[in-house]
Amino acid sequence: MTLPRVYISRELPATVMHAAAERFDLVEDPQSRPLNRTEARRFLEEFDGVVPTLGDHFQGDVFSDPERIRCKILANFGAGYNHIDAAAARAAGIVVTNTPGAVTEATADIGMALILMTARRTVEGDKLLRSGAWSGWHPVQMLGRGVFGKTLGIIGMGRIGRAIARRCHAGFGMDVIFFNRSVVEDAGVPARQLRSAAEVMQQADFVVVAVPGSPETHHLINAELFSAMQRDAVFVNISRGDVVDEAALVAALEDRKLAGAGLDVYEFEPEVSQELITMPNVVLLPHLGTSVLEVREDMGMMALDNLTAFFEGKPLPNPVN
């Protein structure tokens, strides 16, 4: 029996790569960077299945010649798949899957970390101590913002939004308000769904964005919404970088329309605005949302399970189109 020929675009944990080599005719030549247009097109023509991930260029133009495409499934490694034009893939006869459940808790942990790091100025404090400039404790040194009992605003009450709400409500006694495009019957904690993102931004002490990346959510958070925020509020983004108009965020911070920001994702990743880098009230992480070994292993095995089900003609565990 001939095994399906599969390409994995980036090196995954060893357990996943070993399992993939047992199940498929695996070509082990992973890149250390996102696939460009030319590479994406070539792999579509040479493989039965591809495991792409964040940043790989599987946009509409690579599907323009379907007669030359051999690939029948893109088993994305990750919950977000805005780097894939799923509609164009479907039109070319390609199924797209993702790995949604595995990322929830680890991503919510990073959201919680960014709230605390930004509010309590922990990065600034670390730099102060390491610089040798710390002269010892005193009563008004590096005063930050309290988190306990404050109002948390969530934009996007899906799996990750609910997980953040649990942490903030149960662990920090926070009131939870949120905006979601569809009605949420049960947020998992006491919470109020508001009619618009603007209302959430107006009322929250901490705003966390947890929506999927898509054309519909591109620049969902813009200058108008930043203007609605309280001046002592903190903004956190753990979704996708282009959900936020980064230039508008920089302008809002420069104009002191909000107190600070914590970011794990960026609009032009891996490039980060120099203005953000130089701001002491902004905490920047290098897209650590799912950077936990067991999570990455779970994601990889979910991607392989999607591939296996497809090639065996079974129902797909996680189809997105």
Image (spheres, rainbow, N blue to C red):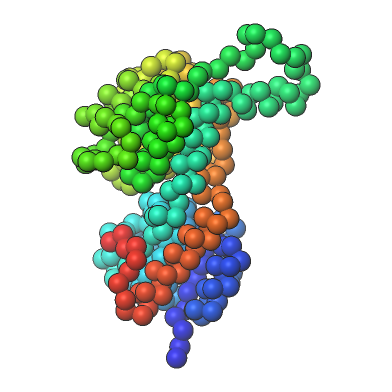
Residue at x 44%, y 80% (from the top left corner): 4
Q: Quadrant of the C terminus?
A: bottom left
The residue sitting at the top extreme is 139
Of residues 199 and 252, the one drawn nearer to the viewer in this rendering: 199
Q: Position of residue 111 (x, y in %)?
A: 47, 37
Whether 3 is drawn above or below 10: the answer is: below
Rendered view: 134 above or below 98: above
Residue 214 on image: x %, y %:
33, 47
User: Within the image, what quadrant is residue 231 found in?
Assistant: top left
Task: Please give the name of the residue rendered at 49% of the width and 78% of the height, measured from the top-left corner.
Answer: 23
The image quarter in which residue 134 lies: top right
Residue 156 location, quadrant: top left
Given residues 46 and 132, the one toward you in this image is 132
- Which quarter of the rendered picture does the N terminus lie within? bottom left
Q: In the displayed structure, does residue 313 sit left or right of residue 235?
A: left
Q: Residue at x 69, y 26 (%)?
A: 127
On the image, the x and y values in percent for residue 5 come to 47, 78
Image coordinates of residue 179 in percent, x first then y, are 28, 33
Question: Residue lying farthest right?
Answer: 132
